Image: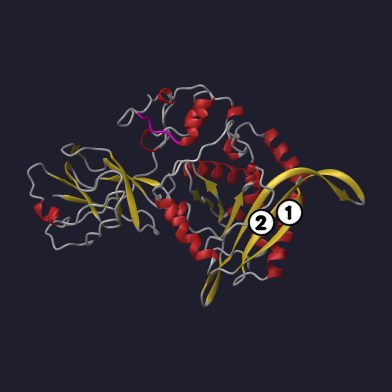
Amino acid sequence: MATKIVMAQLSPTMEEGKLLEWKLQEGDAVEAGDILAEIETDKANMDVESLGSGVLRKIIVQAGATVPVGALIGVVAEPEEDISSILAAAESPPATPAAPAAPAVPAAPASPVPERVPVPAPPAPAAPAAMPAPPPLAGGRVKASPLARRLAEAAGLRIEDIAGSGPGGRIVKRDVEAAGVSPSMLQASGSAAPPVPVGPARLIAETVEVSQMRKAIARTLAASIGPVPHFFLTTEIDMEHALDLRAQLNARLSTGKIGVNDLLIKIVAEALARHPDINASWHGDTIVRHGSADVGVAVALDGGGLITPIVRSADRKGLLQISEEARELIGRARDKRLLPEEYQGATFSISNLGMFEITEFTAIINPPEAGILAIGRTQTKPVVVDGEIVVRRRMQVTMSCDHRVIDGAMGAAFLGTFKAMMENPLEMIL
């Protein structure tokens, strides 16, 4: 029986998708479960599996095209099977990257062939170190992220000699690290700002196609900064005890390390547990107070874009468990391999730009969350303590609040608790 391959809705907010690559060509044999294509959604790149066996009889939408959810993109059927009724449903010309997307084919056309909607394959496991380098694309170009190319060039490595473990064999940052790049050349987990290029810069006029992720960001933030009445609260935190505790914990760990973000996630979650009015969201006639602190962490992606993987129930987890989960989620976020439930539905978020030497900034709330904490850099500075000038490590944070849910005093109380726990982190276990 023929299987219709359509642009499936691979995330709840997805309205259209970009077909990045066909893994097979017309005429190739197909087994149920085979990966047919790679799709760019609004938040991740996901594989499309075949639900039927036979032959890839027809590719309707070419790689690089963007089409709406439900649009027919290909057909799998037996070699001699009549698929004319299915192809008749695709009379409208397919979309091209430079043209508006073609209208969606009805989800259930009047055809004797039942429609089967492909589902995303599970995230691909990391490739072993001995995996051969990926084959070059047409024209000899190897698939690699811009960051991976920069790091390989800085290390004097040929990008063609590095095995890729990202989607479709794409070379990503961790692959360059595994190839033996010195840590001093890397932006270790975003802990250092990118180096400033030497020499004069040259601007180039160009029009850049908007990615599905950038479209989703635009829709979400346009629905936030206008309709959501923001106000902002800023405070400065003494980081001496928190950083000392982190150093002591890491000295005792044989594998993995506790990062500053891990401390932030844990203490934000503990503060939310003490201020349930902040761990809430606006729903018109009601305010929903959530039963767990699901903390999102904003992660910048190679080539642009932003995603917020979520540490669920962080108020009920230990610091080491949070660290392990966050590390794994952030790694898959940078490879665009998160599942929708792993980046949607946070109750509060953190955005940290301290590693880029940003002292202070304000972040835009991601609805329906009622707040987000913007973290600036930790800097050593002279301050007055008990009437004397001393040198301390200090960090500025700014909380963005949805005034429909959070009043000024409520936000200030939460921020005061967060500050007290950061300055005396042992309080989080009392």
Crowding around mark 1 (Cα neighbors within 10 Å: few <14, some 14 to 19, many 20+) is many
Q: Nearer the viewer, residue 256 or 47?
A: 47
Q: Magenta: predominant secondary structure element?
A: loop
User: Quick one: label 2 or label 1, which is nearer the N terminus?
Assistant: 2
Asked if residue 282 shows in the view, the reply is yes
Expressed as whole percent of the image width and height from the top left, the position of residue 304 reads 48, 45
Residue 102: mark = none
The three-letter code of the residue at mark 1 reads Met
* Tag 2 and tag 1, C-beta contact below 8 Å: yes
| Vertical relation: 355 (above or below) 361 | above
Q: Is residue 390 left or right of residue 98?
A: right
In the rendered image, which residue does mark 2 sit on?
Answer: 270
Expressed as whole percent of the image width and height from the top left, the position of residue 20 reads 33, 43
In the rendered image, which residue does mark 1 sit on?
Answer: 421
Q: Nearer the viewer, residue 235 or 277?
A: 235
Residue at (44, 52) in percent of width and height: 214
The three-letter code of the residue at mark 2 reads Glu
Query: Distance from label 2 to label 1 (Cα)?
Result: 9 Å
Q: Is residue 39 left or right of residue 384?
A: left
Residue at (36, 28) in percent of width and height: 134
